[in-house]
Amino acid sequence: MGKKIRAGIIGTGNISGIYFQNGSRFDSMEIVACADLNVERAKAKAAEHGVRGCSVEELLAADDIDMVINLTIPQAHASVNIQALEAGKHVYVEKPLSVTREEGRQVLETAAKRGLLVGGAPDTFLGGGIQTCVKLIEDGWIGTPIGATAFMMSGGHESWHPDPEFYYKKGGGPMFDMGPYYLTALVAMLGPISRVTGSARASFPERTITSEPKRGQTIQVDVPTHVAGILDFAAGPIGTLLTSFDTKGGSQLPRIEVYGSAGTLLVPDPNTFGGPVLVRRAGAKEWSEIPLTHGNADNARGIGAADMAEAILTGRPHRANGELAFHVLEAMHGFHDASEQGVHYKMTSSCERPAPMPLR
C-alpha cells in the first residue's frame, strides 16, 4: 500500500506512548503531529517521537492531517471528536466513544453529515487471541453458543495510577473503564446485544490515593464501582458480566468463558492481544490449548486506527467502528439504568459483528 493516512494525536498522556510506538508498524497510516491542552507537553512528546508538536487548534486546522486519534480524558472525548469532524477529519477515539449516549449519537450524526468515519477503541479484539476465538466459534468447535461469563475484578487504580481521580468521576468506574474491552470482545464473538439488566453500587464513597505523586489525597466517588450485569444477545446466548474496583483481596475468576452446545471456550484477557486460548469439548477430560490462528498477538494497540485508515483508503468497512463503539456505550449505560430503575434495559442500537481479520 503506497499512500498512507496522515494522523495527528490529540492528548499526550500515558496512553499516547504505545500509539506513538506502534505508529510506524502499520502500512496504512503514519503519525505526523500531536497536540495537547498543555502545548509544552505536546512539544516534548513530539520531540521524543520525531513528529510535530502544536496546539489543539493548530492540529485541527492543519492541511496535512487526515485523521485525528483522540486520546483525551473521557469527559473530553465527544467535544474533541466533534471538533475534529467539523474540521473535516476522520476521528478514532480511545474508549469510550463519549460519556453520554446523547453525545455519542451526536458524534455519529456529525460524521454521517460530513461523510467521515468514526472509529473507537478498544481494538484488542483484533489481536490474535480474540480473533482465534472468533474463528473457533465460527468453525463450530463448541457448537451453538449458549452463554458466556466475563469478569473484570480489581481493587481500583488509586494504588498505581499517577492521576487516578477521573476513574471515579462521570465516564469512569469499572464498567466504563474496562467494560468496553469485555463487551467489545463478547459482541465480536456472539453478535449484538438486545437487552441488559443488572445491579450496581459504589461500595466506598471515598478513596485514598496511595500512588505517587498524589499519595494521601482523597477522591470522592461519583460512579458505581461494583457492577453485576446480565446480557441477552440478539442471537440467543445469555451472558454475565461483573466489573469491580472493589475486590481488595484479588480474584481467581476467569476473564471470559463462552459455553456452547458441544464445548467450552476459555478466552484470553480482552485487554491483551494474545493468548492463551483453551477449548474443552464435550466428553474431553482435559483442556486443549489452541495455537493462535491470527497475528498481532503482541501489544498492537493502534491496529484499530490503522484498520480504519485502510478503510478510508479502500472504501471497505472498518472493524472498530463507531456503531460498535456506540452499541457498547449504550449497553454500559443500560446496566446502570437497569440497576437504578429495577428493569431490563432494551437496547435501541445494534451493530454488525466486525468482519474477522485475515488469517496470518
Image (cartoon, grey):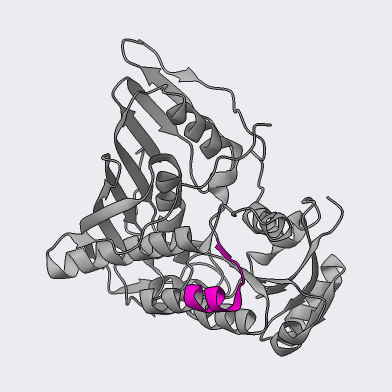
Tell whether 264 sits left or right of 288.
Answer: left
Q: Quadrant of residue 116?
A: bottom right
Does residue 119 show up magenta in the picture?
Answer: yes
Which percent across, then down, holds residue 226? 28, 60
The residue at 39%/72% (across/down) is 168
Visible in this render: residue 215?
no
Which percent across, then down, holds residue 140? 41, 23
Tell whether 38 sits left or right of 186.
Answer: right
Task: Residue lying at the far bottom in this picture: please name it.
Answer: 57
Question: Which quadrant, please, contains the C terminus?
Answer: top right
Q: Quadrant of residue 306?
A: bottom right
Task: Please report the bounds of the magenta region as a residue range.
Answer: 108-120
Residue 5, compared with residue 289, is above or below; it is below
The residue at 26%/61% (across/down) is 335
Comparing 287 with 217, the one in front is 287
Q: Quadrant of residue 10?
A: bottom right
Comparing 357 with 37, the one in front is 357
Tell whether 131 sits left or right of 234.
Answer: right
Residue 275, compared with residue 346, is above or below; it is above
Residue 200, compared with residue 314, is above or below; it is below
Comparing 211 with 169, the one in front is 169
Does residue 337 show up magenta in the picture?
Answer: no
Which percent across, then down, holds residue 236? 26, 40
The residue at 41%/47% (across/down) is 187
